């Protein structure tokens, strides 16, 4: 069984501790704020044995050294970004399978936000740690990759079971919902989702994790083949990547 503790870090990040209840092995998924991560582990009585990075950005790997020094954790990170992350004990490639105690996770290629971005998928638990590749009702900006690369990565995530719970790294859902409603105003499922998000945030409650099945019907960044969205964008015959790129460009300029 995978136990997960989720907690706020920095301005709008989430930190996650994932623990194998059978063996006690515990991973910090990324390291946005070492102080908060270590305090959370201490409060839970969990010993951090691992850090699993999704990509090199400072708000995901900036706490690596401090957490490692305090806990002796082994650092796992995308091989192609190891030089930007620093100390990496276990560089991994997409398709690799890695263990957290008795549990196994698959490394999924989600490049685009950064070139080597990866996600960690615990199939037995229906848990996805998506980093900045996929958000509730959104996705990460394209800082390094191409639309084709990012759409292909999101397609890999969309292919996971509807029951998968997406643990994304930021609380961006309210802003994402406003854009999604703007670009997809006739989606009743999205309207209901947006109302729930508004109510949760009004009470300062998290909107993460998100169920992937719901994202497939409401998140415009996962609906490149939806005929209604394509028609609204005037891209009926465009490639999937071109539709994704148009949605991404619209989001980047949305205010």
Image: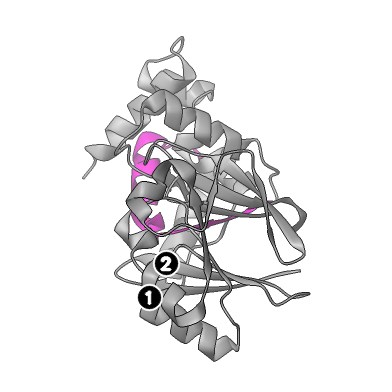
**Residue 87 in the figure: left or right of residue 141:** right
Q: Nearer the viewer, residue 121 or 136?
A: 121
Residue at 38%, 44% in the rendered image: 140
As drawn, 148 above or below 156: above
Residue 148 rendering spot, x and y as whole percentages: 43, 23
Q: Is residue 223 visible?
A: no
Residue at 32%, 37% in the rendered image: 142
Q: Nearer the viewer, residue 148 or 100?
A: 100
Residues under numbered marks 1 and 2 in contact, where contact means CB atoms less than 8 Å apart: yes
Q: Is residue 201 visible?
A: yes
**Residue 81 in the figure: left or right of residue 166:** left
Measured in 3D between alpha carbons, the distance from the residue under mark 1 to the one under mark 2, in whole angstroms, is 9 Å
- Report the label total: 2
Label 2: state its secondary structure. Answer: loop
Q: Is residue 78 magenta?
A: no
The quarter holding residue 238 reads top left
On the image, numbered disc 1 is attached to which residue? 66
Numbered badge on residue 31: 2
Residue at 51%, 58% in the rendered image: 89
- The magenta segment is 164-187
Q: Nearer the viewer, residue 211 or 46?
A: 46
The quarter holding residue 14 reads bottom left
């Amino acid at each position: 069984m995978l136990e997960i503790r989720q907690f706020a870090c920095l301005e709008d990040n989430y930190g996650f501790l994932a623990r194998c209840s059978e063996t006690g092995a515990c991973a910090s998924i990324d390291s946005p704020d070492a102080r908060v991560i270590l305090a959370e582990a201490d409060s839970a009585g969990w010993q951090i044995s691992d850090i699993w990075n999704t990509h090199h950005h400072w708000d995901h790997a900036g706490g690596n050294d401090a957490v490692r020094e305090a806990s002796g954790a082994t650092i796992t990170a995308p091989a192609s970004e190891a030089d930007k992350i620093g100390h990496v004990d276990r560089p991994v490639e997409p398709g690799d399978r890695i263990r957290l105690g008795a549990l196994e996770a698959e490394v999924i290629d989600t490049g685009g936000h950064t070139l080597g971005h990866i996600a960690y998928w615990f199939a037995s638990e229906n848990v996805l740690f998506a980093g900045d590749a996929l958000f509730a009702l959104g996705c990460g900006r394209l800082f390094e990759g191409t639309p084709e690369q990012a759409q292909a990565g999101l397609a890999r995530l969309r292919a996971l079971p509807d029951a998968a719970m997406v643990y994304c790294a930021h609380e961006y859902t309210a802003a994402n919902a406003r854009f999604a409603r703007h670009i997809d105003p006739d989606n009743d499922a999205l309207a209901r989702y947006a109302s729930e998000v508004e109510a949760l945030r009004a009470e300062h409650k998290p909107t993460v994790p998100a169920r992937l099945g719901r994202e497939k019907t409401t998140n415009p960044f996962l609906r490149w083949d939806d005929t209604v969205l394509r028609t609204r964008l005037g891209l009926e015959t465009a490639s999937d990547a071109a539709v994704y790129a148009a949605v991404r460009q619209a989001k980047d300029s949305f205010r």
